[in-house]
Amino acid sequence: MPMNLVVKRFIDRTKGGYEYWVMRMLWEKGFDDKSDLRIPRPISFVEDLGLLIQERAHGTLLNKKLNHNLPVDSGALKAAARWLIKLHSLDPNLERILLHPDDETIIKSCVHRVGSKQPKLSRKIEELGSVIGMRLSSFGDVRFTLVHGDFQGDNIFIDKGKITVIDLGRFCKSDPARDLGCMIAQTRTEVFLENPSSAVGLAEMNPFWEEYLTAISVAEGESLSERACTFAAEKYLENIDYISSFSAERGRDVIHFLLDDAERFAKASRLGETL
């Protein structure tokens, strides 16, 4: 059977080599074509040209299955959770795996950029950044796992029950709640961007969260739930930063919605209060 390929070009060849190494590692650890929870087959990395060659992912993007005008595809959401469970269960003690960049630096940068472009929101953004930072610093010692780093519906393909996850450039070692918070905030953001008038019809993420809970203890779930809320709020802050950089006026309503949702997640102690 012929294989369709994708070629990604990296200006930073170190990043390209790292992503290819991550893909090879995951492929060898069971995220291969024999599994229903997989990544695209990594073919090669041409270092001189900075080219990563991989198999093209098959199926439909998860975000397209979560259109707010259709019933929530709970099966697809549960399968996405199982992919994360599989990843988070791997031994994270690999020398080449990078640690996630410092959250405090990310938050301060986002707050500064949004404040400079949206001066009327400056105070609210500063307060949001402060709450997120304080909550993250209060979590203490957390058992790190391997994390995707950008786990969201635009990086997840569904094909006859099989899940293929792409774009591993942000793969690192961190709190597993980071992937959960990213998935939740990014899904809600994407659905709202598609139709800002349907805030009440946002994709329901309970099937995703409840499926993940089946793999951990009750005590772990309580702690993870609080941390996932905080990471969701941080992802919202990054999304606000990104949107304000491109459409300060046209994106005003979107930014206000995201800010309100970010504040809800930042103050919540468990996901059940927000989903």
Image (cartoon, rainbow, N blue to C red):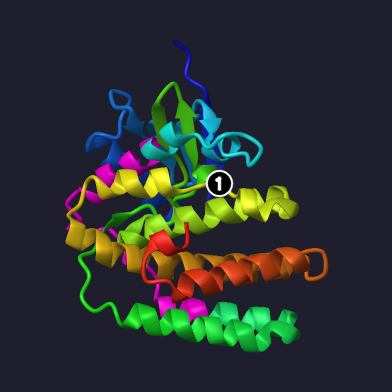
Considering every residue shown, the one lying at the far right of the view is: 249
Image coordinates for residue 263, horizontal then vertical, percent: 54, 74
Quadrant in the picture for the N terminus: top left
Task: List the residue tagged with mark 1.
Answer: 203
Left or right of 275? Residue 64 is right
Relative to 199, say whether 214 is above or below: above
The residues colored magenta run 79-107
Secondary structure of the residue carrying tag 1 is loop
Q: Amino acid at mark 1?
A: Ala
Pick the front one: 270 or 13 = 270
Image coordinates for residue 136, horizontal then vertical, percent: 36, 78
Mark 1 Cα-neighbour bin, 10 Å: few <14, some 14–19, many ≥20: many
Left or right of 144? Residue 74 is right
Pick the front one: 122 or 68 = 68
Relative to 40, say whether 229 is above or below: below
Residue 89 within the segment the image draws in magenta: yes
